Amino acid sequence: MTVIFDQSANEKLLSEMKDAISKNKHIRSFINDIQLEMAKNKITPGTTQKLIYDIENPEVEISKEYMYFLAKSLYSVLESERFNPRNYFTETDMREIETLWEGSVEEDIKFPYTFKQVVKYSDDNYFFPITAKELFMLFENKLLHYNPNAQRTNKTKKLEGSDIEIPVPQLNKQSVEEIKELFLDGKLIKSVFTFNARVGSASCGEELKYDDDTMSLTVTEDTILDVLDGYHRLIGITMAIRQHPELDHLFEETFKVDIYNYTQKRAREHFGQQNTINPVKKSKVAEMSQNVYSNKIVKFIQDNSIIGDYIKTNGDWINQNQNLLITFSDFKKAIERSYSKKDFSTQADILKTARYLTSFFDALATQYVDEFLGDIAKERKRSFVNNYLFFNGYVGLAKKLQLDGVSLDELESKITDVLGSIDFSKKNKLWDELGVVDKNGNAKSPQKIWNFFNNLKIDE
């Protein structure tokens, strides 16, 4: 590490910056503000992002210039004397850095931006070659977006000191590192990136403009360009170029882009169809393939029920210590155990059932507040009432009540009548007699659970 004023001052500044960045790095507005401040000094957003990542890595050396500008930016954004450059740098140092700094921006690009050699498949789908340098510059200038609703995950992180969760890319660091090395070795397969120019984002009302004569495609001003597929490759390539700018022969490596002009909803559907062939996490594909009736129902419950926040999207199983009820894919299976395509003639039928099930689970959660809305993980250890396999039974029971004409207003009292006498504790020998628990006392056999609830009397 370069000595700034003296070693102790250098270490103190580094410690202060690490602390602030660790606490705020998942707050999008904070990152944006830092990037804007750094950009005033000709430092690209991508370079700033790398500095934020590197600051917590003790093996990475950060130059005196970058330390100065990062401290200056933090001082401006956070307005804290902890980051005042004057506390760490001499007047001579600061004047020298400011006057000699040439910046790290190689090329400032923005929309509108035109791609060449573009093949038009339809009015909302085009295909064209793209160089590694173009990918790098688009990413460095924040023109390519990570969209949590159109990617492989809805991974979230809690902001420190709060219960607020924000979406973040779920990056496999090992995969990114492997992609970087393959690219540097010239062995990275020239696979296709999938982008989406999100409908409704352009200020002129038209995100893509195609010229038949020149076979060129222009992405217009203010367009939001989402990366639907290829985010790991994008990060790996940009990381390689940042770390080895001297290998300019790699800049002209050519890849392919399949670009769409879809609404976010349609982009999600496209992603779901594509990944029935190229599978990713089952829960994510299930959530995004909204043309399937069960997915639409679960998504409606997720968006409208009081238990919606406890349905896990970014994973195919739930850890016993997680305060979550069920995964999206398991809820989907529970729906499909009781309902089939034949139950729905129209989209209105699906919506009607989704509303009924939402009201049912709201009423159920109201009856068992601690188990469904409180300390779910703790209650799960003593009771089966919030076990994910029991959702198979609950959906079956809800369908019985729906077919029996039980109104939405009557659901809460009816659930009390039907389930009130059932002892859901794991100590109840009934569960062993029914064959719904294994030798370790864990729930099993969703069909037997469904049978139990289906046989409950509801007309007494």
Image (spheres, rainbow, N blue to C red):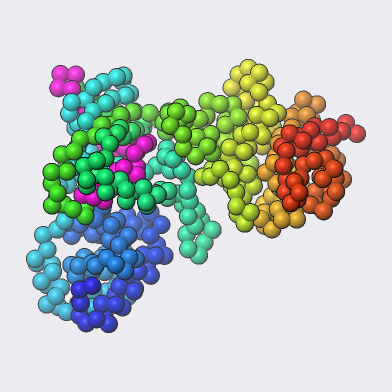
Which residue is painted at 23% across and 78% down in the image?
A: 88
Pick the quarter of the image with the C terminus: top right
Q: x, y (%) of residue 79?
A: 32, 69
Which residue is painted at 29% across and 19% down in the image?
A: 121
The foreground one among 203 and 287 is: 287
On the question of residue 142 being in view, the answer is no
Which residue is painted at 76% across and 38% down in the image?
A: 449
Pick the quarter of the image with the N terminus: bottom left
Q: x, y (%) of residue 159?
A: 47, 59
Q: x, y (%) of residue 232?
A: 34, 44
Query: Which residue is most to the left?
Result: 100
Left or right relative to 19: residue 374: right
Q: State the extent of the magenta-drawn residues as a range.
A: 212-241
On the question of residue 273 being in view, the answer is yes
Q: Quadrant of residue 418?
A: top right
The foreground one among 196 and 312 is: 312
Left or right relative to 374: residue 412: right
Which residue is painted at 20% across and 35% down in the image?
A: 254
Q: Image height check: is 20 above or below 443?
A: below
Q: x, y (%) of residue 73?
A: 26, 64
Q: Quadrant of residue 40?
A: bottom left
Query: Which residue is most to the right?
Result: 460
Left or right relative to 184: residue 419: right
Q: Image height check: is 402 above or below 34?
A: above
The reply to whether the magenta stretch includes residue 431 is no
Q: Image height check: is 93 above or below 384?
A: below
Q: How many marks?
A: 0
The foreground one among 437 and 262 is: 437
Q: Image height check: is 28 above or below 234?
A: below
Q: Quadrant of residue 316?
A: top right
The reply to whether the magenta stretch includes residue 214 is yes
